[in-house]
Amino acid sequence: MPKFNPLADWSDDDVWSYIHSHGVPTNPLHARGYPSIGCAPCTRAVEPGEDIRAGRWWWEQAQHRECGLHRRPLDVVVREATAGVSP
């Protein structure tokens, strides 16, 4: 069965313009620097100039993008990231 995404060619500006002009409710974290929101341990705010997905799975290597809840406990992930250990 074919799948269609009517927003596939919309830019971020298009999406936010629609949200604002139609009063679509959003997560308050968007206004606090979280453009991509997932579960709490896997999400952080992004810095200016970072890719909008940089706040998701922030401790992972580029080739591994899986939620830490599904791979290993967050305290292990944070300890490894702080120590500079590769997963």
Image (spheres, rainbow, N blue to C red):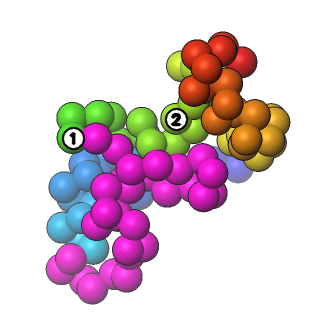
Examine the image and state in which quarter residue 39 appears. Answer: bottom right
Tally the numbered discs: 2
70 left or right, relative to 58 = right
Mark 1: few, some, or many residues within 10 Å (few <14, many ≥20)? few
Residue 40 belongs to the span the image colors magenta: yes
Residue 33 can be seen in this image: yes
Circle nearer the N terminus (2, 1): 1
Disc number placed over residue 20 in the picture, else none: none
Residue 4 can be seen in this image: no
29 left or right, relative to 49 = right
Which kind of residue does numbered mark 2 sit on?
Trp
Main SS, magenta region, reads loop
Q: Position of residue 32 (x, y in %)?
A: 31, 63
Residue 43 belongs to the span the image colors magenta: yes
Vertical relation: 18 (above or below) 67: below
Q: Position of residue 61 (x, y in %)?
A: 58, 19
Q: Residue at x 45, y 42 (%)?
A: 55
- CA distance for labels 2 and 1: 15 Å
Q: Position of residue 67 (x, y in %)?
A: 69, 41
**Local secondary structure at mark 2:** loop
Q: Which residues are magenta?
A: 20-47
Mark 2: few, some, or many residues within 10 Å (few <14, many ≥20)? some
Q: Position of residue 10 (x, y in %)?
A: 28, 51
Q: Residue at x 73, y 41 (%)?
A: 75
Disc number placed over residue 58 in the picture, else none: 2
39 left or right, relative to 56 = right
**Local secondary structure at mark 1:** loop
Residue with the mark numbered 1: 48
Which kind of residue does numbered mark 1 sit on?
Pro
Q: Residue at x 38, y 55 (%)?
A: 34
